[in-house]
Image (cartoon, grey):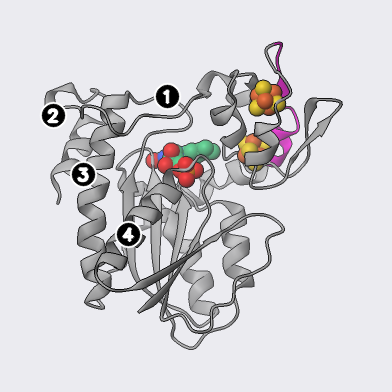
Amino acid sequence: MRLLFCVFSGTGNTRRVGELLAAELRALGHETEFFKVKRGAPMPATEGFDALIAGYPVHAFNAPTPFLGFLKRLPAAEGMPVYLLRSSGEPLRLNDASGITPKRILKKRGYRVRGEFSYVMPYNIIFRHTDKMAARMWQTAEARAKRDAALIDAGGGATRRVGPFRRAAAFVLRIEHTAMPLVGRHFRVREGCVGCGKCAEVCPQGNIAMKEGRPVFGKSCVGCMACAFGCPKDAVSVALFNSWRVNGAYRFDGEAAADEEICRYCRRSYLRYFHEI
Ligand SMILES: Cc1cc2nc3c(=O)[nH]c(=O)nc-3n(C[C@H](O)[C@H](O)[C@H](O)COP(=O)(O)O)c2cc1C
Ligand code: SF4
Ligand code: SF4
């Protein structure tokens, strides 16, 4: 099969997981191509592909706005299979609600969603996981990618059912997506900024312009946190969310956390996720 991966990723977690799954599919003899979902990028051609893998990070229990916009612009298709691939900071079932709108859009466009795959990767907002937890998540992702690639190879997969309580909660929390462009206008850079321009480079919305060596934030922020996470000087202040700011890349190749080292917060759900394979 020829598979087209269309991935929106702020801080690289979803992209990493997508690349992992793509490598497993290639090992099974399939061809893969990657398309980065980003504001202003021309739409990819879908002809000649047998299936689409659409990837996104969970933002407030929903899919990010640019990802939904991308799905709406996809050419109509007659029954082309799609797999949703998401990454989230926690193994919460509420995160499954983020698939509701993508599935609705895809169905309207004539696509057939065959499966949904969820991967837990370290948080890029709220709190910083330890590198040991990041390594454990990565090892789990490697095992799950093998399993999910085998499922795609066999033409299998399943979508997630979401009950009314989770639907309602995710619907309410969509407010975060409406508020983000307003909050993002108040992002600022602090003293330590050296004007390197990395924040502007990584912003998937093209929302940061460098003016006289200083980043200036525009009106189209979606809160992906790429700018704050990737700044080498931790100089981006993210307004209302500043106390939740997480800065600096995680290490995935070190020693992995053992079961008893997993943080108490949500421990049971992380254990369930790690042992589910
Ligand atoms: C604005 C925002 C909201 C988030 N909301 C959730 C959430 O509702 N549930 C969750 O488990 N993780 C949440 N996260 C964490 C990300 O989904 C997670 O770190 C993801 O792996 C990031 O992927 P990326 O690097 O591809 O952007 C949120 C992150 C951001 C920036
Ligand atoms: S990445 Fe950080 S240091 Fe570089 S321009 Fe942006 S805010 Fe300044
Ligand atoms: S300004 Fe920062 S948080 Fe907002 S979309 Fe750009 S990179 Fe993401």
Across and down, in percent, residue 128 comes to 40, 24
Q: CA distance from mark 2 to mark 1?
A: 20 Å
Indicate whether residue 214 is drawn in magenta: no
Residue topped by disc 3:
273
Q: Quadrant of ligand 2?
A: top right
Residue topped by disc 4:
23
- Of labels 3 and 2, earlier in sequence is 2
Q: Residue furthest right?
A: 212
Instruction: Tell me the magenta residue range.
Output: 181-191
Q: CA distance from mark 1 to mark 4?
A: 30 Å
- Of labels 3 and 1, earlier in sequence is 1
Type of the residue with mark 4? Ala
Give the label on residue 259, or none.
2
Residue at 23% in and 23% down: 264
Type of the residue with mark 2? Asp
Across and down, in percent, residue 64 comes to 55, 51
Residue at 39% in and 55% down: 18
